[in-house]
Image (spheres, rainbow, N blue to C red):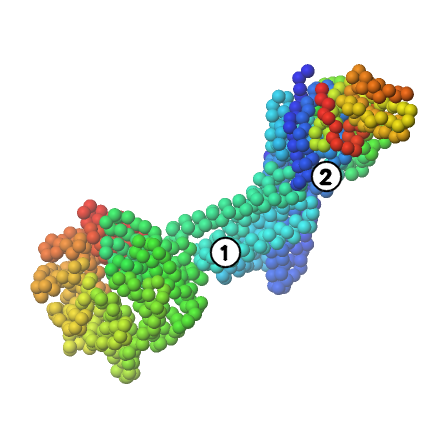
């Protein structure tokens, strides 16, 4: 499938702090990309660079086969963006804001916007300053979706939302958009939420994308291994894909990705008295990749 | 430009013009109620135009990006598919329209209220050096500048109140800095009064342009980067603005109306001193070169006969076309325009013996090494002094003028050996009943300090003067029967000399060359061998040969003017021709005679039909310069091509 967005070698520093080192990945249409990273790892920075809000220090962004420099604006007509924080003009009314926003987009679908507002229970005459956080999120979503974007970038918009609203948002909107062909880059801290919608998983750590795989594949290949030994536990062997190892009196627990015959053989050579292998949750996979210690080896599809 | 963004700005900032309109109503009511109280209307009008409207402007400008920072909407706005520069421009235009509308309504309404209307028309705001500007002009300049500055700063700061104070500080800072630069560095010149609002506007435009450029390129997530980007652009744009101002001054000075022309010649070159600067005309190359002058006025002082040095004065102007003595500086340079140096600073700032002395009558020696000049203590002509100084500024000496009862002493020139100067001196009148004052010629040795008086009652030696080599001095005398003029009496009788004489400056021996009624101007030819002279009330032109000791040719001229005016006379074509200007009908003509005065040609001097003052004439190689004092024009006549060219 053709790439909608391609990012290559992106780097960004704030003063002496290097936030993005060498970020490269690609997005395809009709897929939801779960975008994970610890606080301060640069998810928001990356989203802002993609939206032309701030410039990258190096690297390139290619949208629909064309490189987009920092000053370019036209490509943003096909991208929806919901920032992390509330971003509205609080003095505006809902419909006024949507009209204002729509003026920037030639593909703005006013009818669809009206229907979306009704479906999401947004009062068009309400002042934005009177809206709840969930309603503001809905408004942002309508503003983003109304432009019929080919790519939607969500920068952790669901944090602070109640569970039903979040559930509606993920299932009712994000999945629906992807099914219509929109690529969604969904950055969030709510790791478990991605399990409901994500097709692919991107993990940003140490200024690089260290995991870029199909979500199902990651789930299928990540394992927690528990080993028991008589007496002291031996030293953990050099097994490629070890994400996490914890050893204590006669017991070892490790996260391994990808789990394959080679890894299993290597572990069995330790001759444990008992061995348990079970799948990892997404949260555990995330922790395994970005937990304490040095950046993990990159896993790219 | 984005219409929706402009509309959004208008909605968002609607409170500002509404608030201004409410105040306008209050102002109108107050003006009506206190219509008879002049002091109230004074304060009201001043407050509105100098405080309220500028404050409204700065408030409006500072609010430009306030909502984007307050609501966190900047990331939203910048992520829209519109270029950041377009966001800046759209917002600027939207707010500018609000400000322009507000100012317009204020002006229209207030200019119809009796009392306020007159004050708007009459108020003059002094800004620099007494120059005044209209109330409305100052209000517009301040308001628009403050608006641009505040708008520009608001892009980079999320604190509106901070922007307001910073804008005022920046505006005041730039205003003071430019005023200082204009006044102190450029030597304030009223011709550049217009630059005050221009430089304010330019500084505001520079700030605005920096903001626009930085806005489009800067990383708004980093405060330091924003400000650094802005400041970098600002330095660039201010430098550009400075270049523009400098160029405007240079161009303005070159095209400044000419209010005076003074001409000095040396060799084949003429040195032309104008209000625009100091120029050199090379008669051989037929080229004009600007040697000095920019925002200052220059005044000719002297050119050394041997081609060494030029001395000129520079003045700051305090008022238009006035040359105040206290700002006068004296400069010296080589005749090719190189090695310019300040010889004497303005007498007000000069320390040492020349402190407080007004200096005049500068005369460089023939070899250009020394300069003599006169001075008097400011306001006291009776205390005239004589000084000499080396051309490099060293060796300043005061020379005691050993002439009893001296009124004034005028330097005529240096002798050939560069050791002595020839002066014309005048004694004070001793007897009020008989206010006859006597002229003398003097030879003064700078080394020995010896004064030698000669030539009692020599007549206006400046009309004849030193020979080109400096070995002889030409002068003239009244007939013994005639009485010298009384300076305090009525100018009833027109006295003109009847004896043309020459002094040998080594022996100071006098030789009377000829006697003729009413002798006019006499000039040495470039070799010093012949003298052309006018006589018989300027109706006869003659040439006297020194070698032959007699008049070698003479011719009749047209009738002289009724008024007592000398006909200007000069040699040209290296002594091959004699030229003079005369009146023919209603216009002036240039008459050119060959050296035998046998043949003459007449050429009308262009554009002299309406002038009253006879144009001066000066031969210079194969060119003749004709100076029209009245219109401040300088013409060049090419003897070979017989064509006129206007130099200035």
Q: Residue at x 39, y 61 (%)?
A: B342
Q: Residue at x 9, y 60 (%)?
A: B553
* Residue A20 shown left or right of residue B456 in the figure: right
Image quadrant where residue B493 sits? bottom left
Q: Residues within 10 Å of mark 1 (few under 14, many from 20)?
A: few
The residue closer to the viewer here, A297 or B239, is A297
The residue closer to the viewer here, B389 or A147, is B389
Q: CA distance from mark 2 to mark 1?
A: 42 Å
Q: Residue at x 23, y 74 (%)?
A: B442
* Residue B177 shown left or right of residue A294 in the figure: left
Q: Position of residue A199 (x, y in %)?
A: 77, 20
Q: Residues within 10 Å of mark 2 (few under 14, many from 20)?
A: some
Element assignment for label 1: helix
Q: Residue at x 63, y 24 (%)?
A: A62
* Residue B29 shown left or right of residue B316 in the figure: right
Element assignment for label 2: loop
The image shows residue B224, relative to residue A122, as above or below, that is below
Mark found first going from the N terminus, 2 or 1: 2
| Residue B334 in sight | yes
Q: Position of residue B32 (x, y in %)?
A: 65, 58
| Residue holding disc 1 | B181
Q: Position of residue B451 (x, y in %)?
A: 25, 76
Q: Position of residue A50 (x, y in %)?
A: 67, 29
The image shows residue B490, relative to residue A45, as above or below, that is below
Image quadrant where residue A293 sits? top right
| Residue holding disc 2 | B72
Pick the quarter of the image with the N terminus of chain B.
top right
The residue closer to the viewer here, B159 or B369, is B369
The image shows residue A19, relative to residue B112, as above or below, that is above
**Mark 2, chain letter?**
B
**Mark 1, chain letter?**
B
């Amino acid at each position: 499938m053709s790439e909608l967005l391609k990012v290559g070698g992106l780097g960004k520093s704030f003063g002496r702090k290097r936030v993005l080192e060498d970020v490269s990945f690609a997005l395809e249409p009709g897929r939801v990309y779960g975008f994970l990273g610890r606080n301060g790892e640069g998810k928001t920075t990356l989203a802002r660079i993609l939206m032309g809000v701030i410039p990258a220090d190096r690297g390139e962004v290619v949208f629909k086969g064309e490189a987009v420099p920092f000053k370019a604006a036209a490509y943003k007509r096909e991208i929806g963006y919901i920032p992390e924080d509330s971003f509205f003009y609080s003095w505006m009314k809902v419909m006024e804001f949507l009209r204002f926003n729509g003026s920037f987009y030639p593909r703005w679908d006013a009818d669809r916007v009206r229907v979306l507002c009704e479906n999401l229970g947004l009062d068009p005459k309400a002042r934005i300053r009177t809206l709840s956080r969930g309603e503001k999120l809905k408004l942002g979503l309508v503003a983003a979706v109304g432009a019929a974007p080919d790519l939607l970038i969500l920068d952790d918009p669901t944090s602070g939302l109640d569970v039903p609203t979040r559930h509606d948002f993920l299932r009712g909107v994000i999945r629906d958009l992807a099914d219509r062909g929109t690529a969604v880059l969904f950055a969030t801290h709510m790791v478990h939420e991605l399990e409901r919608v994500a097709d692919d998983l991107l993990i940003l750590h140490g200024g690089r994308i260290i995991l870029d795989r199909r979500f199902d594949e990651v789930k299928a290949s990540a394992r927690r291994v528990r080993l028991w030994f008589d007496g002291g536990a031996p030293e953990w062997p050099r097994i490629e894909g070890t994400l996490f190892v914890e050893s204590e009196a006669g017991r070892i627990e490790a996260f391994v990705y990808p789990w394959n015959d080679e890894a299993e053989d290597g572990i069995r050579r330790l001759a444990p008295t008992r061995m348990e292998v079970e799948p990892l949750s997404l949260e555990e996979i995330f922790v395994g990749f970005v937990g304490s210690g040095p950046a993990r080896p990159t896993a790219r599809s | 430009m984005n219409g929706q963004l402009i509309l959004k700005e208008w909605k968002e900032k609607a409170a500002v013009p509404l608030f201004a309109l409410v105040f306008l109503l209050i102002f109108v009511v107050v003006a009506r109620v206190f219509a008879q109280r002049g002091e109230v209307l004074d304060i009201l009008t001043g407050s509105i135009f100098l405080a309220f409207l500028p404050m409204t402007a700065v408030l409006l400008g500072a609010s430009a990006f306030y909502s984007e920072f307050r609501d966190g909407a900047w990331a939203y706005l910048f992520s829209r598919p519109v270029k950041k520069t377009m966001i800046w421009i759209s917002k600027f235009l939207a707010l500018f329209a609000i400000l322009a509308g507000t100012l317009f309504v204020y002006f229209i309404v207030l200019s119809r209220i009796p009392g306020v209307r007159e004050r708007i028309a009459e108020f003059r705001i002094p800004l620099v050096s007494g120059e005044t500007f209209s109330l409305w002009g100052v209000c517009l300049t301040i308001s628009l500048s403050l608006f641009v500055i505040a708008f520009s700063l608001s892009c980079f700061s999320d604190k509106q109140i901070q922007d307001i104070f910073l804008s005022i500080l920046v505006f005041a800072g730039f205003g003071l800095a430019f005023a200082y630069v204009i006044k102190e560095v450029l030597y304030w010149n009223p011709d550049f009064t217009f630059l005050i609002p221009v430089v304010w506007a330019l500084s505001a435009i520079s700030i605005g342009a920096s903001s626009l450029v930085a806005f489009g390129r800067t990383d708004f997530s980093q405060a330091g980067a924003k400000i650094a980007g802005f400041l970098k652009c600002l330095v660039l744009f201010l430098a550009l603005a400075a270049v523009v101002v400098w160029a405007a001054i240079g161009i303005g000075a070159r095209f400044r109306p000419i209010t005076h022309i003074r001409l000095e010649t040396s060799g084949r070159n003429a040195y032309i001193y104008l209000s625009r600067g100091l120029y050199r005309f090379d008669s051989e190359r037929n080229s004009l070169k600007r040697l000095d002058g920019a925002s200052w006025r220059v005044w000719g002082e002297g050119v050394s006969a041997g081609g060494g040095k030029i001395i000129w004065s520079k003045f700051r102007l305090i008022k238009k076309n006035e040359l105040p003595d206290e700002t006068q500086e004296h400069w010296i340079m080589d005749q090719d325009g190189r090695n310019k140096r300040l010889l004497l600073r303005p007498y007000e700032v000069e320390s040492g013996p020349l402190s407080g002395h007004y200096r005049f009558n500068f005369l460089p020696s023939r070899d250009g090494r020394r300069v003599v000049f006169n001075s008097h203590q400011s306001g006291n002509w009776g205390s005239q002094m004589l000084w000499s100084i080396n051309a490099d500024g060293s060796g300043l000496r005061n020379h005691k003028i050993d002439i009893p009862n001296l009124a004034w002493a005028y330097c005529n020139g240096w002798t050939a050996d560069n050791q002595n100067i020839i002066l014309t001196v005048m004694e004070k009148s001793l007897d009020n009943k008989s206010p006859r004052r006597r002229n003398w010629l003097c030879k003064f040795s700078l080394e020995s300090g010896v004064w030698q008086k000669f030539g009692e009652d020599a007549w206006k030696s400046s009309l004849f003067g030193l020979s080109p080599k400096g070995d002889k001095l030409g002068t003239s005398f009244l007939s013994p029967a005639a009485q010298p003029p009384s300076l305090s009496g009525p100018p009833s009788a027109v006295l003109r000399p009847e004896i043309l004489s020459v002094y040998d400056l080594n022996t100071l021996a006098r030789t009377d060359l000829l006697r003729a009624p009413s002798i006019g101007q006499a000039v040495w030819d470039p070799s010093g061998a012949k003298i052309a002279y006018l006589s018989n009330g300027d109706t006869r032109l003659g040439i006297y040969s020194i070698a032959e000791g007699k008049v070698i040719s003479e011719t009749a001229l047209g009738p002289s003017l009724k008024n007592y005016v000398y006909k200007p006379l000069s040699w040209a074509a290296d002594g091959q021709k004699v030229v003079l200007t005369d009146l023919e009908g209603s216009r002036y003509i240039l008459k050119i005679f060959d050296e035998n005065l046998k043949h003459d040609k007449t050429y009308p001097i262009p554009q002299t039909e309406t002038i009253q003052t006879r144009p001066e004439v000066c031969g210079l190689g194969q060119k003749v310069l004709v100076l029209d004092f009245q219109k401040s024009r300088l013409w060049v006549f090419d003897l070979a091509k017989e064509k006129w060219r206007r130099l200035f």
